[in-house]
Amino acid sequence: MKISKLLTFQISSCNLFKDEPCYKCEDDWKEHGGNCYYFSTNSSPWNESRTVCKTKGGDLVKIDSEEEQNFLRKNVQQKMEIHDIPFWIGLTDLAEEGRWLWVDDLNEGGEVQFWIALTFWRFFEPDDWKGKDPDGEDCGRMGPVYWFDNSCKRSRGSICEKSAVVGHHIFVCV
């Protein structure tokens, strides 16, 4: 009797997972919220980092929520314990100084107004400092806690983002 109930429970539990969506990412990518993230510690300038992300099927990360920021921050902190480099994110004011845009909004006229309230920028950032580059600082990067503007010519790590592949639970995500 006990074995029969256990078997019934196991079979019905399996049916609960059948055909429920799950998200899959390639090796070396981390899944979160239906997206895949690749944390590259290979240092390169912002444009080159963006090109690398595109060759991997994504783009530099666009941060859409505080929850996503927290996920990224945790991973950046872990990476920075080993590799002492900050990471490029998909944020730039190259088109117009002071008008920060995500990479997917560059041709659509969007702005980063949402982030003004959440203030992930470090105090007094962005500041377009011209001390090491007369062109200033037009690309966004993420440190262990905050965002900073940096010269796009500096070599940094990068965070790539792309949509996850939707699979289905049978016993594992397939």
Image: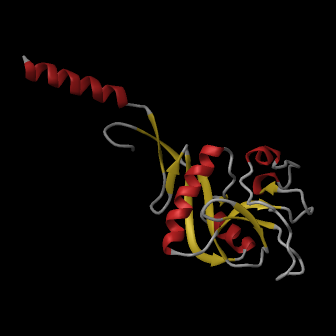
Q: Is residue 54 left or right of residue 169?
A: right
Q: Is residue 171 left or right of residue 5?
A: right
Hey, which residue is sitting farthest front in the picture?
A: 123
Give the answer, above or below, for where 130 lies relative to 164.
below
- At 54% across and 63% down in the image, what residue appears? 77
> Residue 33: horizontal and vertical position, in percent?
55, 43
Viewer-proximal residue among 174 and 132: 132
Viewer-proximal residue among 120 and 166: 120
- At 92% across and 61% down in the image, what residue appears? 96
Q: Is residue 11 left or right of residue 147?
A: left
Q: Is residue 108 left or right of residue 154?
A: right
> Residue 113: horizontal and vertical position, in percent?
83, 46
Hey, which residue is sitting farthest left in the picture?
A: 1
> Residue 166: horizontal and vertical position, in percent?
50, 42
Looking at the rendered structure, the number of numbered marks drawn on it comes to: 0
Quadrant in the picture for residue 149: bottom right
Hey, which residue is sitting farthest top in the picture?
A: 1
- At 81% across and 51% down in the image, what residue appears? 105
> Residue 29: horizontal and vertical position, in percent?
50, 59
Viewer-proximal residue among 83 and 90: 83
Q: Quadrant of the C terminus?
A: top left
- At 9% across and 20% down in the image, what residue appears? 2
